[in-house]
Structure formats: C-alpha cells, structure tokens
Image (cartoon, grey):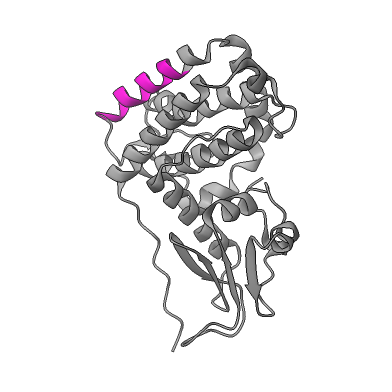
Amino acid sequence: MPPARKRTRTYDPAKIRVAVLAQFGNVRQGVHTLTEEQLARPARLGDWSVRELAAHLTMAVETVSRNLDRPEPGAKELALLDWPFATAARAGDIADGTRELARDNPDLDALYARVEERITERLATAPDDRLLAARTGAMTLADYLVTRTVELVVHTDDLNRAAGADIPLDRQALAACTRLLADALAVKAPGASTEVRIPPYAVVQCVEGPRHTRGTPPNVVETDPLTWIRLATGRTEWETALDEAKVSASGERADLGGLLPLMG
C-alpha cells in the first residue's frame, strides 16, 4: 500500500488577521518604550541598528497595504509552502529599503501609527482570496498574512534580543509561524522516518528512510517554538542548540544540521 498523502495544513483566516494586528500592536507598544541608547545598539543582523530593525518591522505589514492598493494580478503564482524558500533572493533589496525607511522616518511612533492605521483600514474590506502582487510571487491575501506572522515573530524576537526588550509574542502568531516553518522542513526533506516535535504547536514527519507506523518513533527531534524558529531562520546553529540542551535529538536520522536553516 502506498503511503498516505499528507494534507496541507490550513489556517483560519480570521484568526490570522487578528494575530497579525495583535503582534504588530505589541511591537508598536514595545518600540515606543525603547530609549535612544537601545535604538542605537547593533541589531546583530548585518550592519543594521535596532532603529533600522524597528523600522523594518513596519514593512512586514505595510507591504500588505501597499499590495492591496495595487492592481490585482491575474493568477496565483506562489503557494504558501513555497514562500519560505523564495525569500532569500530579496535580501539585498530589503536591506537597502530598510536603511532608507529608517533614515526617512526618524519618528518611529508616527511611522508605526501610520502603518497600523493603513493595515487596519484595508483589512476591514479585503477578501481572503484577493490576490496580492508580492515580490516573491502572487499569493492570496489569506496565505500572505500567514507569512506575515513569520516576519513579525522572527523580528520581534530579534528586537528583544538586540535591545534587551520584552515585547510579547501573540500566541496565535507564534503558533502560525512555528507551523509554517515546521511544514517547510517536511517539504525540504520529505519522508516519514523522523518526527520533529515542537510542542504545543507542531509535529511533522520528515527525512527519507524506514517509515514509522506505531509506538515511539526511532528518530525524534524535540524543541521549543522559539528555538525552532531561530534554527529555521539561521539565528541559532544546530550544534549550538544541542550543546545548550535547547534541542533533544535521538536516532541516526535525527541530525537536522544539514537541512537548516530553511530561510536565510
């Protein structure tokens, strides 16, 4: 009997909309409290400062508003699980745009207020199946908003670590980010010999080899959501996470070091 085809995960569009707005609101409040000394610190992302990282976070949602203002493309080009692998090519453009945005908007409070007002207004009337002409490829609004949870959660974590801040992560945004990156691993390394557990949000099977059918899998990786997100985006090295006991890995096919990061 052939193996059962894995079903593509679905997300509740209404909950994702709420999560995106909630996490952006969390970031807006957190950035408001940052001092000039904190904003001047290195962000540990290339040569960005924390101020530039804070400005970049507004781009995660402003791109939704901007694409909703543009004509709708004729056809969908990118599925949700294609997106994590389509982002690296835009890194240079994003870095240049971020520096320009930070330079042109020294008042971060005003920038965040303007961006929040625009995204709230446009999401109020935009249908989930509306296509957006994203630079990575045309996607539905519903799918694109799931990708925004990744951008917001990943960079909120970057901001917290660089600035010594404590901006909270919305639970639904964290869950969606974790699940999308876990599913991306299963796409990159299809199979069912290894089970990757990221409680409480995701469990995926991946890596070619003998298929597990019952009982405890012979190859198991387990970690927490933030460690997984840092591994998947290159913020943490696999060996470092193992050495710090942030990841447990058992079995001959439980070494994911060669598969990570998923996103640059």
Choose between 143 and 223: the one closer to the eye: 223
Residue 139: x %, y % from top left: 42, 41
Identity of the residue drawn at 42% across and 70% down: 6
Q: Which residues are magenta?
A: 112-125
Q: Is residue 99 above or below residue 6?
A: above
Is there any visible trace of residue 79 in the rendered image?
Answer: no
Is there any visible trace of residue 117 in the rendered image?
Answer: yes
Choose between 221 and 126: the one closer to the eye: 221
**233 sits to left or right of 195:** right
To which quarter of the image does residue 41 belong? top right
Residue 12 colored magenta?
no
Choose between 18 and 138: the one closer to the eye: 18
Residue 22: x %, y % from top left: 37, 35
Identity of the residue drawn at 32% across and 25% down: 120
Name the quarter where the N terminus is drawn. Answer: bottom left
**113 sits to left or right of 210:** left
**89 sits to left or right of 58:** right
Residue 177: x %, y % from top left: 48, 49
List the single residue furthest toward the left: 125
Identity of the residue drawn at 50% across and 60% down: 183
Residue 119 colored magenta?
yes
Identity of the residue drawn at 49% across and 20% down: 32
